[in-house]
């Protein structure tokens, strides 16, 4: 599709069809019913929305990658224009998104391009470690694990087998914990299927800080650590990775963490296209916004999701890059665009924290909800329920559009 546009006065363009962008588009669709002069365009490099929160399951081999790719065409109403292309920059003066399919003009732009892995310039990390931020990344992790187990099974030296069948995960945040738990639970069974003794695979979780799941309650951290230990995950805290080499992760204290597969889950930063723009950015390159989620000095651009640096006025801290934050911000942006169209005042964004749930393995998890900490099967069921509810909400919002095609 040629993306070039003759005029942009009635155009709302959403850049990115992830948690934030898709929800802006879905919620805005119905609001535009009474504004036929307005049109809505969603731009993404993929023709599918990714359920990123489910990636640890794909990387652990318990879910197919295609199951977390939700086709955007099935999700968007027929009159929402979808352009599949790479966004390469912004022409802020002329209000145009620069893309591989040509420039796309906007009256209002919603920036929802998410984030990308942050390797903190650790030497060798980008080359040596896999990342986990897309369905394709997750497929690559699972492919590398299968290959390493096959190689281990072909050997006879138990030490070499153990090293090849060890997965080292860098970063003990929620992503690292979920991945480590998932793999620790599935690897013994998969090893047996490869003809490898079930005690050969191992999972190591390496965290630079003093604790995994930093920022969570001590109770939640304790419960997660117990489940990981029960699953046989070796957790190393206060272990800063200084370099990634052919042999493994070299720690700051000189120790070498060996393995057959290395995954980096140590943090995220804003996409390159934002770093290269003149947009105002803060910590980790995220775009600074006002209380209405409009980019500072650019009231015609909203930002939502990981890309936005949103300060929670109650704590004074920038909100974490989380799907639940992205969804709430997406709702506010859709409401504020609707308010602009109807001449109503804009609404300040307030984050309503629904709690924190992390799966640890295929059957257990930990959760902090309304000040109550739980660990075990219930927390895992909760995580399943959240993922199910999310998928239902996408379907419901499409159905909710009275003129969906
Ligand atoms: C493995 C993992 C597990 C997670 N689990 C949880 C969890 O359990 N709970 C939770 O709350 N959060 C979780 N998160 C965080 C959550 O996934 C993110 O906060 C969320 O995806 C942010 O939504 P977003 O809309 O900002 O970005 P995304 O969902 O990443 O969407 C960004 C979109 O922009 C598109 N895009 C980016 N750049 C370009 C470009 N240049 N051109 C065209 N298109 C582009 C991408 O294709 C993508 O569709 C997890 C993250 C990871 C990595």
Image: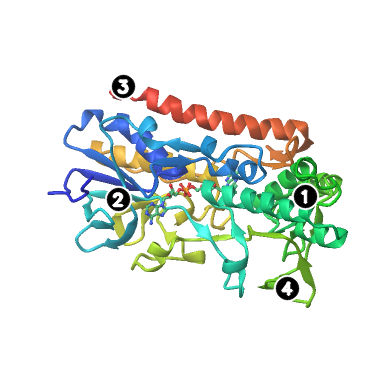
Q: Quadrant of residue 124?
A: bottom right
* Residue under the point 26% across and 49% down: 108
Note whether 46 is above or below 125 in the view shown: above
Which of the marked residues, 3 or 1, is nearer the chain's N terminus?
1
In 3D space, how far apart are the residues under numbered discs 4 and 3 (Cα atoms)? 57 Å
Residue 250 numbered mark, or none: 4
User: Which residue matches tag 3?
Assistant: 402
Q: Nearer the viewer, residue 398 or 108?
A: 398
In the image, residue 342 above or below residue 301: above
Question: Which sits earlier in the primary sequence, circle 4 or circle 3?
Answer: 4
227 with respect to 62 (left or right): right
- Would the CB of label 4 be found within 8 Å of ligand 1? no
> Which residue is at a point 55% across and 64% down the rendered structure image?
118
Q: Residue 221 carries which label?
A: 1
In the picture of the structure, the residue carrying the numbered disc 2 is 109
Residue 203 visible, this angle = no
Residue 235: x and y in percent read 80, 57
The image shows residue 122 at horizontal and vertical percentages of 61, 73
Q: Disc 4 and disc 2: Cα gap in Å?
A: 43 Å
Q: Of the two numbered discs 3 and 2 on the same chain, state the one appearing first in sequence.
A: 2
The residue at 75%/34% (across/down) is 363
The percent position of residue 13, horizontal first and vertical second, equals 28, 46
Q: In what element is the residue under mark 2? A: strand
| The image quarter in which residue 163 lies | bottom right
Say which label, 4 or 2, has the lower sequence index: 2
Callout 3 crowding tier (Cα within 10 Å): few <14, some 14–19, many ≥20: few
Q: Would you say the residues marked 4 and 3 are in contact, meaning their CB atoms lie under 8 Å apart?
A: no
CA separation in Å, label 2 and label 1: 40 Å
Q: What scheme was used to colour the molecule?
A: rainbow
User: What is the spatial separation of the Cα atoms under label 1 and label 4, in whole angstroms?
Assistant: 26 Å
The verdict on label 2 being within 8 Å of ligand 1 is: no
């Amino acid at each position: 599709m040629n993306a070039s546009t003759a005029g942009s006065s009635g155009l709302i363009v959403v850049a990115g069809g992830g948690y934030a962008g898709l929800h802006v588009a879905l919620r805005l669709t119905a609001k535009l019913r009474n504004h036929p002069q307005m049109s809505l365009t969603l731009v993404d490099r993929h023709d599918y929305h990714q359920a990123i929160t489910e990636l640890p399951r794909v990387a652990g081999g318990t879910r197919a990658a295609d199951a977390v790719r939700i086709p955007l065409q099935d999700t968007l109403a027929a009159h929402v224009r979808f352009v599949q292309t790479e966004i390469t920059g912004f022409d802020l003066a002329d209000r145009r998104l620069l893309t591989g399919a040509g420039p796309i003009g906007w009256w209002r732009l919603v920036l929802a391009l998410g984030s990308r892995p942050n390797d903190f310039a650790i030497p060798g990390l980008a080359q040596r470690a896999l990342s986990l931020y897309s369905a394709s990344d997750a497929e690559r992790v699972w492919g590398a694990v299968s290959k390493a187990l096959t190689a281990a099974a072909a050997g006879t030296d138990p030490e070499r087998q153990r090293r090849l069948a060890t997965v080292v995960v860098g970063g003990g945040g929620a992503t690292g914990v979920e991945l480590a738990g998932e793999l620790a639970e599935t690897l013994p069974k998969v090893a047996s299927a490869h003809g490898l003794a079930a005690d050969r695979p191992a999972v190591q979780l390496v965290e630079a800080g003093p604790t995994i799941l930093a920022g969570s309650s001590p109770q939640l951290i304790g419960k997660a650590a117990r489940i990981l230990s029960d699953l046989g995950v070796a957790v190393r805290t206060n272990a800063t990775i200084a370099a990634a080499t052919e042999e493994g992760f070299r720690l700051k204290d000189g120790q070498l963490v060996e393995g057959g597969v290395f995954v980096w889950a140590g943090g995220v930063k804003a996409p390159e296209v934002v770093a290269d723009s003149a947009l105002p950015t803060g910590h980790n390159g995220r775009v600074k916004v006002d209380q209405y989620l409009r980019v500072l000095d650019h009231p015609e651009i909203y930002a939502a999701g990981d890309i936005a640096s949103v300060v929670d006025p109650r704590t004074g801290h920038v909100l974490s890059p989380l799907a639940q934050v992205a969804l709430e911000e997406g709702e506010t942006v859709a409401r504020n665009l609707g308010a602009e169209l109807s001449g109503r005042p804009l609404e300040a964004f307030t984050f309503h924290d629904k709690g924190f749930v992390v799966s640890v393995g295929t059957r257990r998890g930990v959760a902090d909800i309304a000040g109550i900490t739980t660990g075990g099967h219930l927390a895992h069921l909760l995580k399943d329920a959240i993922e199910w509810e999310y998928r239902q909400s996408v379907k419901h919002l499409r159905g909710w559009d009275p003129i969906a095609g």
